């Protein structure tokens, strides 16, 4: 019934180049360093094995080749610094910084409402307090959980609009420099590890249950403040959506199923998380990576 939400979320994850591009850029810089090291070793090998009686012309030709290789490396280094990997890495770092800033502001706003939350700046998530948020096998929040989610909705309405693209950003926001803007917010539903045992026809398994929890939280957030449902990303699409993970993403990774059946652990895993996805110019990234790959291949061929 709700499993399609997971498939749609996986499709959205494939479009998000924020995290994998950073890893790829680091890899490109690493390859460049290896090429420089290989050339240096090659030059030293040539010097050590030079024949003392080599004629002047051979020495000059070797020196010219070495100078040409150094020039190619210098040209590539300037490209990486001015046009290639470094600028993209800078924009990704700026986007990561802004995401952390949003999470911190949301956390402080919720703490002001006496709601303790955890944030994960590496993954861009905020976890609502699990205690009493949901009862086992239930998609509707407890009264306490409903109040917590309503406060989250109000906090999103207050903080998030100033981190959208400039053309959809309210005029009341202070000017913000930097490339990082919000592209999506996902309300994520999770369950504990207990096999689903319910006679309610609405749910077939934990996937359905986690999706239903995300949807219920989304509905509460949407009506907590009328501005929430109007939030759009830079493409003019709805900013807030839902996703579901059943029991597949426990709070404490690596714990055995037996230990996860402890009631306190089960209550922790029955939760809602909020994930922020930052926008990156995908076309620019892909074009730069294509050009960078071509230049690396040419440089490698020239230095052989």
Image: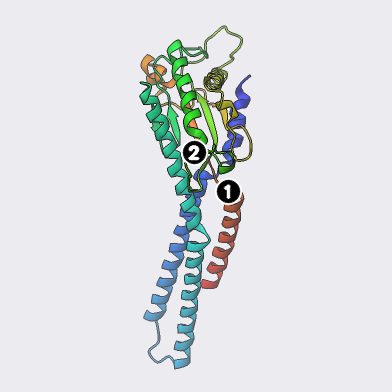
**Which residue position is annotated with label 1?**
281
Residue at screen point 41% across, 26% down: 251
Q: Work out whether 77 lies above or below 221.
A: below
Question: Is there any visible trace of residue 27 in the rendered image?
Answer: yes
Residue at screen point 60% across, 26% down: 5
Residue at screen point 63% across, 26% down: 4
**Which residue position is annotated with label 2?**
173
* Residue 151 rendering spot, x and y as whole percentages: 45, 21
* Residue 270 rendering spot, x and y as whole percentages: 45, 19
Q: Earlier in the sequence, mark 2 or mark 1?
A: 2
Question: Is there any visible trace of residue 254 in the rendered image?
Answer: no
Q: Are marks 2 and 1 in contact (CB under 8 Å)?
A: no
Q: Work out whether 82 lies above or below 129.
A: below
Q: Nearer the viewer, mark 2 or mark 1?
A: 2
Q: If the image is split into quadrants, where does the N terminus sit? A: top right
Q: Name the foreground residue: 274 vs 137.
A: 274
């Amino acid at each position: 019934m709700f499993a399609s939400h997971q498939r749609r979320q996986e499709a959205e994850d494939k479009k998000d180049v924020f995290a994998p591009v950073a890893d790829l850029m680091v890899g490109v810089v690493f390859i460049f360093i290896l090429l420089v090291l290989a050339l240096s070793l090659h030059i030293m090998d040539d010097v050590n094995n030079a024949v003392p009686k080599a004629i002047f012309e051979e020495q000059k030709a070797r020196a010219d080749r070495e100078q040409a290789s150094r020039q190619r490396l210098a040209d590539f280094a300037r490209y990486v610094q001015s046009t290639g990997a470094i600028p993209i890495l800078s924009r990704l770092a700026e986007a990561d910084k802004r995401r952390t800033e949003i999470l911190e502001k949301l956390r402080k706003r919720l703490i002001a409402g006496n709601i303790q939350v955890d944030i994960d700046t590496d993954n861009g998530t905020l976890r609502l307090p699990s205690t009493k948020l949901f009862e086992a096998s239930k998609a509707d929040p407890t009264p306490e959980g409903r109040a917590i989610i309503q406060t989250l909705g109000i906090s999103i309405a207050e903080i998030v609009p100033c981190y959208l693209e400039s053309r959809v950003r309210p005029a009341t926001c202070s000017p913000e420099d930097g490339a990082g803007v919000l592209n999506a917010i996902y309300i994520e539903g999770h369950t504990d590890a207990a096999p689903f045992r319910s006679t309610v026809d609405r749910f077939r398994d934990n996937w359905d249950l986690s999706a239903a929890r995300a949807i219920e939280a989304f509905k509460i957030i949407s009506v907590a403040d009328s501005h929430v449902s109007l939030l759009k990303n830079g493409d003019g699409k709805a900013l807030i959506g839902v996703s579901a993970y059943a029991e597949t993403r426990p709070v404490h990774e690596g714990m055995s199923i037996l230990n996860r059946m402890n009631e306190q652990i089960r209550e922790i895993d029955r939760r809602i998380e909020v994930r922020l996805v930052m926008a990156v110019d995908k076309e620019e990234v892909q074009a730069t990576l294509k050009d960078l790959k071509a230049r690396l291949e040419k440089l490698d061929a020239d230095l052989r």
